[in-house]
Amino acid sequence: MNNSEILETVGRISGVNPRKCMKCGKCSGACPAYDEMEYHPHQFVSMVESGRIEELMHSKGIYTCLSCFACVERCPRMVEPARLIEAVRAVYLRQQGMDHMKPEHIPEILDEDLPQQAVTSAFRKYRR
Amino acid sequence: MQRIGVFVCWCGSNIAATVDVEKVSEVLGHEPGVVFSTNYQYMCSQTGQDMVQAAIRDYALTGVVICACSPRMHETTFRRACERAGLNPYLVEIANIREQCSWIHKDKAVGTEKAIILGRAAIAKVQLNKPLQAGESPVTKRALVIGGGIAGIQTALDIADAGYPVDIVEKQPTIGGKMTQLDKTFPTLDCAACILTPKMVEAAQNENIHIYSYSEVEAVKGFVGNFHATIRKKARYVKEDVCTGCGLCTEKCPQKKVPNEFNLGLDTRRAVYIPFAQAVPKVATIDADYCMMLKSGKCGVCSKVCTAGAIDYHQKDELIEQDYGAIVVATGYNPIKLDKFDEFAYSQSPDVVSSLEFERLMNAAGPTGGVLLRPSDHTHPKTLVFVQCVGSRCDSEEKGKPYCSKICCMYTAKHAMLCREKYPDTEVYVFYIDVRTPGKNFDEFYRRAVEEYGVHYIKGMVGKVVPENGKLKVQASDLLDNRQLHIDADMVVLAAAIEPDESARPLATMLTASMDTNNFFTEAHPKLRPVESPTAGIFLSGACQGPKDIPETVAQAGAAASKAIGLLSKDHLTCNPCVAEPDELMCNGCSSCEKVCPYGAITYADKEFRGPNRTTLLRRVAQVNPAVCQGCGACTVACPSGAMDLKGFSNKQIMAEVDAICR
């Protein structure tokens, strides 16, 4: 897929219209994982708007997004940045062999305090 | 034989860009009855009007069709032009090929086709037009101003100054409105009370102004120049003309726990109260929801202490009937409720306040005597966070408003500046999306807050506020620095969006005045007639028409007054001759029309008709009072026997239009 095809696919999967954003930054103000990612929720929206989708796709930050939907809840313009990130992740993973999480990673991250459910859901989310 | 002229306007490129005007005038020129057809760039200009007049004379036209903008825009212009050329003005028809055609179509072929159809309909209708003569109706030389805030007061003062009597109806016990609750006013920082209270007193003392305080408009009937209003003067259980405003009752009343609405519930008042020291009229009011005497018959303290004998527990609501020529709406605004904004902890912490509450906390006559104290523990706040656009510019209908509330940028700059000036030990942060300061000396004011007073302006929105151990943990984004901020604040002030007063919607229905989806009154034209409602005789003053600050409100109030004065200065108004007319032979006397008439223009009379075999029948038939009828056409639709017709819009004319469209 070229850049504009990715943009179109992301738009279709997410249903997000980045032009609705008024750049208030409330999403980034609300984000609990802000310091964990190199691009922040308001930047997701503006990067998609300006077509810098590949940079976003290859950023580690999209897997740090907790999908807590605080940004979706608080956005005064109903832009819903988290849906955008979900879509970018999905587009990336839909490419052949691009899974972010592979079964062999699991033993490594298993930890007594971590509910197994979290691992299962992460596995579903980061793998096609 | 009809001789009709067709005139197609380009409206610059407004019409010509999506409608082939040449083709429209060419095709319409071949319609039956049309003897002349042309097009021109600006038909409403002097040259355009001259073309119409010349054609009327040269071709002896018996009817004129103008294909142009909405009749609401220029129907009167073209009627006058035709009248000057000797043609009855009601022989003019407008085909709206702008708002209903060129502005809504993109495809020129589609637009052109529709313009031709609309033109054909108008030609079909004008064939059946009859010359009509307009009558006259008198004007009651008295104005009604609904709402006694700064907008209503200024409008009333200006109308009174021109020599006409004005009544102000205010639902609160005092006039003054929101401005009485403000501390200082931007951008000059003069105290609101110091500039408002003299105007309130002036209004009270002006012999042309009568103030109905603690009153509401209950019903309005009639039409421009001849309105009839019913005003409910609510029982305040105090004789207004006897009370001296000494305030003794308000000190002695044992019911002390009534939330004080003037201070937005930040402190309490008694059940008998005067809202504030400079109230006009300065008369006590008993709050029936809290007065023990009115609720249980046990108390009567106020009556005992009142030396003037003004207390009257048996007072009843009073209905006042009055005629008016003009009505000015000045119902104002309110900040929205903030209970839906859980992310800012407004309902969780008393130290998160709205800007209007902050205004009271800074005011010398407020609950803290002008000393800024946290509502929770009455300590001095050291770190203050101001959040802009709370509920403004919001796409979610349930949470906020889609518009910019216009006043928040400036009052927040004012609050931040005053805070830093009075308490230099404070740190003040303002989180903004955009700083909007278009106004005389406004941007300079905001820059002073930043440069001289050291207010921290941060581009970004607060994401959440969490009360924790007496502090307010504020998490926000700084978009320019690209970092997330965490501030331990002592107080958070929310700049709440503003909305029209809840009385506005029912009032608009009563006045048949139009409103937008946000419940702001609609102006007759957004640029050229900003203070008139599309309903004749109804004028708009202040924030009921849209968010605005005090200077703009006062300017609009004066403009509304001058429009009202222009109306009141006329002895007679030309009536609309397009009124209902019953066909008495077809009327069956069913009263359907009488029931639907919103103006009370239809009555019934028993009339003699010739029956079969030289007998005389007495039949009950509808009668229309043409001076009262406004030509709304409700009766023509309601009449089951088709006996009611609207002059200029007869059933036959409408059907001719429909036939032409379907041809």
Image (cartoon, coloured by chain):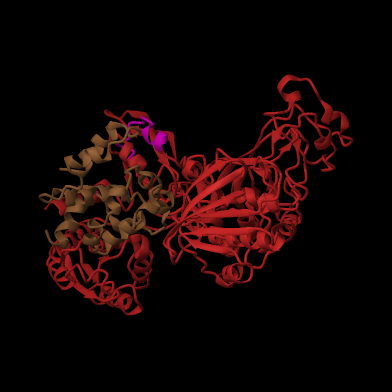
Chain colours: A brown, B red
Most foreground residue, B295 or B67: B295
Q: Quadrant of residue B245?
A: top right
Residue B617 left/right relative to B224: left
Residues drawn in magenta:
B583-596
Query: Which quadrant is the N terminus of chain B positioned in?
Result: bottom left
**Image location of residue B441, percent across then percent down:** 59, 72
Residue farthest to the right? B307
Residue B451 left/right relative to A17: right
Residue farthest to the front? A108
Q: Is residue B138 visible?
A: no
**Image location of residue B306, percent across then percent down:** 86, 34
Q: Quadrant of residue B191?
A: bottom right
In the image, is residue B590 part of the stretch drawn in magenta?
A: yes
Most foreground residue, B582 or B178: B178
Most foreground residue, B182 or B136: B182
Q: With respect to residue B216, does A10 lie above or below?
A: below
Residue B344 left/right relative to B57: right
In the image, is residue B18 part of the stretch drawn in magenta?
A: no
Q: Is residue B60 visible?
A: yes
Residue farthest to the bottom? B47
Residue drawn 19% across the image and 68% down it: B19
Taken as a whole, is the magenta stretch helix, strand or loop? loop
Numbered circles on residues, count: 0
**Image location of residue B259, percent across then percent down:** 68, 36
Residue drawn 27% across the image and 28% down it: B613
Residue B470 left/right relative to B594: right
